[in-house]
Each structure stands twice: as structure tokens, then as C-alpha cells.
């Protein structure tokens, strides 16, 4: 991992503790004017190309860590009463969408909670103009705290995590 987003646990002046999605968590989350600091990661708040690239790397690292801890690549969702699978397409879509916003990148640190505890908000048809949704028969919009989870349903009824984004801006 490049040092563009790794945080060396040093104390910086002007930082304050923050919460995410209204949740107290067991992670130390602090921020300054330019960055959010979570665990060993620096999440840039900016909208520049370098900031987005840094957030993409963080999201990929979170998924790598999560898949190492969850080799079956799925979790049981209580509301759906079914498993939600994390596939390559899940990672791709989420990296492309969540890296645009530092709050969506922060949401990725709650991946397990989101997959297990998100509640169904609505079921919809896939957007046929969106190439990546064309392979699904249904899209399920779910929410956990202030995080949106989209789940694609295959014709086999397999539920695939499609995208995760923060509802906070």
C-alpha cells in the first residue's frame, strides 16, 4: 500500500474525533481540514484526481482484507433472509462510485455491518440503460444507517452486492 493513504498513527494538531452514520464504533476516527483518519488509512476529502485514486486504493484494500476474513465471500442478511455475495462486479462498481466521495469511502469500513443489517427500502427493475445492471432481473435498494446498499438479483435468485454509497454528502 502506498504511503499516499497510510497513516502512521502520529498525533496531528487541529484534529477532532468524528462519528460516521451516527454510529459510535470501535475504530478511532479523526479528521482535519483535508483528511479523515481511520485505522491506518488517510482518506482525502478533496475531489481531485489524486484524492479519488487514493480512495480507490483504500476501497480495494478494504475489500481484500474483507475477502481474506470471509473466504466464502458472502454474509447472511437478516432482512432478506438470504445471503448477499460479494463478487468482482461488486468491487468494481463500488470502487467506481464510492471513491467519488470520502463519506462513501468511510462507509466501506462498515462492510460487514452493511451486508448483515441493511433493510430493504424498495425493489426495482434494473436500469436497462446501465450496462452493469443488465445482467440482473431485479435491483434491491437497501439501507443501513446512512448508507445505501444496492443488491442485484440474478435469474437464479443469487443476490450480489452491486454498490455501496453513503447517503450523506
Image: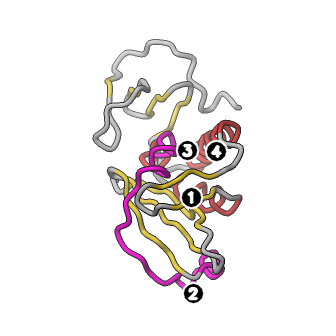
Q: Which mark is residue 149?
A: none
Taking the spot 67% from the left edge, 50% from the top edge, the residue there is 73
91 sits to left or right of 102: right
To which residue does mark 1 refer?
Answer: 83
Going from the N terminus, do you reach mark 3 or mark 4 first? Answer: 3
To which residue does mark 3 refer?
Answer: 51
Q: Alpha carbon of mark 2 to alpha carbon of mark 1: how far? A: 25 Å
Q: Which mark is residue 63?
A: 4
- The magenta stretch spans residue 162: no
Q: Say which of 61 and 137 sits in front.
A: 137
Tag 2's secondary structure?
Answer: loop
Contact (Cβ within 8 Å) of mark 1 with mark 4: no
Q: Which mark is residue 128?
A: 2
Q: Residues within 10 Å of mark 1 (few under 14, many from 20)?
A: some
Q: Alpha carbon of mark 1 to alpha carbon of mark 3: how far? A: 33 Å
Going from the N terminus, do you reach mark 2 or mark 3 first? Answer: 3
Does 9 sit above or below residue 65?
Answer: above
Going from the N terminus, do you reach mark 2 or mark 4 first? Answer: 4
Q: Alpha carbon of mark 1 to alpha carbon of mark 4: how far? A: 17 Å
Q: Which residues are magenta?
A: 107-136
Q: Within the image, what quadrant is residue 1 found in?
A: top right
Amino acid at each position: 500500500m502506498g504511503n499516499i493513504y497510510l497513516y502512521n498513527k502520529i498525533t496531528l494538531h487541529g484534529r477532532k474525533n468524528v462519528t460516521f452514520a451516527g454510529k459510535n464504533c470501535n475504530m478511532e476516527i479523526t479528521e482535519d481540514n483535508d483528511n479523515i483518519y481511520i485505522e491506518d488509512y488517510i482518506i482525502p476529502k478533496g475531489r481531485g484526481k489524486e484524492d479519488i485514486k487514493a480512495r480507490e486504493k483504500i476501497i480495494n484494500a478494504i475489500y481484500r482484507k474483507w475477502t481474506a476474513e470471509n473466504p466464502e465471500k458472502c454474509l447472511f442478511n437478516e432482512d432478506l433472509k438470504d445471503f448477499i455475495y460479494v463478487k468482482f462486479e461488486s468491487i468494481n462498481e463500488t470502487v467506481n462510485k464510492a471513491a467519488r466521495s470520502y463519506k462513501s469511502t468511510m462507509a466501506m469500513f462498515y462492510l460487514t455491518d452493511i451486508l448483515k443489517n441493511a433493510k430493504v427500502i424498495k425493489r426495482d427493475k434494473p436500469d436497462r440503460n446501465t450496462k452493469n445492471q443488465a445482467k440482473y432481473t431485479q435491483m434491491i435498494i437497501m439501507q443501513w444507517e446512512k448508507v445505501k446498499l444496492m443488491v442485484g438479483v440474478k435469474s437464479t435468485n443469487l443476490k450480489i452486492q452491486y454498490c455501496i454509497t453513503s447517503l450523506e454528502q
